[in-house]
Image (cartoon, helix red, strand yellow):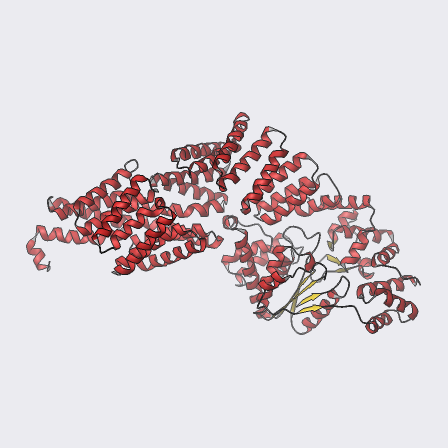
Amino acid sequence: MYVRGEAGIGKTRLIEEIQRTATEAGFVCHAALVLDFGSGAGRDAIRALVRSLLGVEVTSDTEAAHAAAAAALSSDVVVSDDTVFLNDLLNLPQPPELRPIYEAMDTGNRSRGQQRVVARILDRKSRQHPRLLVVEDLHWADQPTLAQLVKLTMAVAEHPALLIMTSRVEGDPLDGVWRAEAAGAPLATIDLGPLPSDDARALAEALIAANTAFAQRCVERAAGNPLFLDQLLRHADESQAIAVPGSIQSLVQERIDRLDLADKAAVQAASVRGQRFVSTALQYLLDRADYLPDRLVSRLLVRPQQGHGDVFLFTHALIRDAIYDTLLRSRRRELHRRAAEWYADRDPVLCAEHLDRAEDPAAARAYLAAARSQAAEYRQEAAQQLVERGLAVAHDRRDRFELTCLQGEILHDLGTMREAGRAYQAALDAAADDRERCAAWIGLAAVKRVTDDLAGALADLDLAEKVAGRDDLLAEQARIHFLRGNLCFPRGDIEGCLREHGITLELARRAGAAELEAMALGGLGDAEYVRGRMISAYDRFRQCVELSERHGFGRIEVANRPMTAFTQWYAGDTRGALAVADTAIARAARVGHRRAEMVGHHAAFFCRHALMDFEGALLHAEAALTLAQQLGARRFETEALVFFAELHRLAGRQSEALTNAKEAVKISRETGTAFLGPFALGALALASDDRNTSQAALEEGEALLRAGAVSHNHLLFPRDAIEFYLEAGNWDGVERSAAELEQYTRSEPLPFAAFYVARGRALAALGRGQSDMAEIAAELERLRDEGARLGMRVALPSIESAMISCAGSSNPSAARQRGL
């Protein structure tokens, strides 16, 4: 249900009556307010509902929230995989083991995870008792809250639960877009109009049976607004006045003027906190540890928030606003400044907001600290809003510069590069010295790298390096060399990439910058991979992942773990690589990093294929293709299609294999043959029954390797070419392909390559029949054991057949007895 109406029209009173009736009917009620001011970090309406559902008060400490989370997990209200989202909803810090996972998620995945947890909690709790959920004052809701309410509206339709939302007509946020997203969920909208005259007179007579003439004037003045009428009548009861105040503000001012000095000071101080306040905070503002707002409650100015201990609410937002307006500006500023002191160590967001309302020059720097605290918890949208407000109130040039730089960083992380570039350019324009300009240049270079303005990025880095080197700014130098290393990569300057990332690694370690160190290790792993040094690449990727795990750098870890699996497989540890790949897939899927998940499936396919787990390999091929299509990454469709071609070929489905291989080659030509072209052509050669087609594919693949292709082609294409030539009995082709594979890995011998080179040569020697059979038999036995150790089981059947053949050749009688 969605209840709309003007301020004071009776929305809250209607909700109270519904809650009373629901309680009598066996419902458990949970209510939350959307506040225009004073909610603080991690205390929004959705989180308030979750706390209520789990039995945690709004003001409960971290220990109580931890206990509620533990109880929810132990009772299966929330499954363990959703702990990270439950922690977020309860505003709990993520433990070390979950922090990398949360850090690696984008905003969309976090939001979807929270929505899933809220729905699960509602499901479990509503099975015990039906639930009434109330969210009031949506006219103040932000977009994340509205998005959550779309899902909550849909969730209650599936459970014994009722959701009631309220809003003023002015500022109604449930527009056509919102309602379209919630389509299918039953939603009844109730528009409250003014009280009819007869009902208004009945209300008036119930409150002041005497003085009916005055009551009639009150009814006429209120014009059907129940709050205004109620306040008019209560004011009359207090004053026995004849005149009717002209507005709620004027009558509230008259009412508080009748309070004693202590209560008047208290209600005014409370209004500084917003619609909701805590009695201990009020006591701090008053510097009176013994003050209790009992008389304010009896005068119907404030009321306890049901089920929330020492939390109080003003009876209506209009009453709070009217009281707040009675404060002199000087007193208002003083109280806000004192409130900021109260929150200084408790809530940096509320501290900044109170300094802002105190018109304190320190507000901008407080917003900077608050934004950094939110960014550190990966709440980028909240951090961005705080930065924007900080910039709006900033007068100090230094504050504006730092806020603008942080804005650029946040926008970069959110992926809005054009806006991030504008922010960094504004920071550069506002910079007062070389150090500030250095920071802005580095930020601009980071943005230009993503937007492919490589020349502009390098120019910015050159300018920044002059300052960083002169002033011995180690962290800045490390960042400069890291970005320069990344810029070398798309230009094909692998030596430059290695050099720059190597310098980054050294500087990061000197500066104690662990995140930059992890990033440098990942960059070095990429560079070593591209030049085919897979063992070195594995070492770098492994170090990167281990360092990231220790420090909670989830995004770095998730992005690099699949490459650890790939290179570990090439290095000869198929079973270990498969375990790493499975972990990489699970981590990437959990945080929504679909590219890393896809690459993890690629690595897992190679491992399961090598181990002859073809059913498992098929699942990875299917997942990889689906993810590539979802990402719109057509060049990766090539790889998945080669996987299908290989599995069809091994199963004897040559026609299907040929179809997949042809499609893979087609896509590789459309997206750039350097990436996977030779790999696809090797699959085509193996799948085709036409010798000319196969030979043409092999010749084209060899030409692409000579022209320059990504490293994995130099390893996978010769392997497949060796296989083709062995099946064709082309021993010279086997020797040529084996020599090419051996030559490519000469600078850093690789178990994968060494095994396939030796296997090809041994089988070719047997095929020629010109070598000593005992030597061949010994080599084949060694290769069988080596292949089993490496996990290359898919290559063993041909070796075992050859061993039988060798035994038959050396002992014809025994061979005849075995039926050979």
Residue at 82 percent of width and 49 percent of height: 327
**Place of residue 634 in the rendered image (x, y in percent of width and height, measured from the top left):** 40, 52
Pick the front one: 730 or 82: 730
**Place of residue 70 in the rendered image (x, y in percent of width and height, measured from the top left):** 55, 58
**Place of residue 321 in the rendered image (x, y in percent of width and height, measured from the top left):** 78, 54
Pick the front one: 501 or 817: 501
- Residue 159 shown left or right of residue 5 in the figure: left
Q: How many marks?
A: 0
Image quadrant holding the N terminus, namely: bottom right
- Residue 149 shown left or right of residue 592 in the figure: right
In which quadrant of the rendered view does residue 127 lie?
bottom right
Image quadrant holding the C terminus, namely: bottom left
Residue at 26 percent of width and 59 percent of height: 654
Pick the front one: 346 or 89: 89
**Place of residue 677 in the rendered image (x, y in percent of width and height, measured from the top left):** 33, 47
In which quadrant of the rendered view does residue 357 lie?
top right
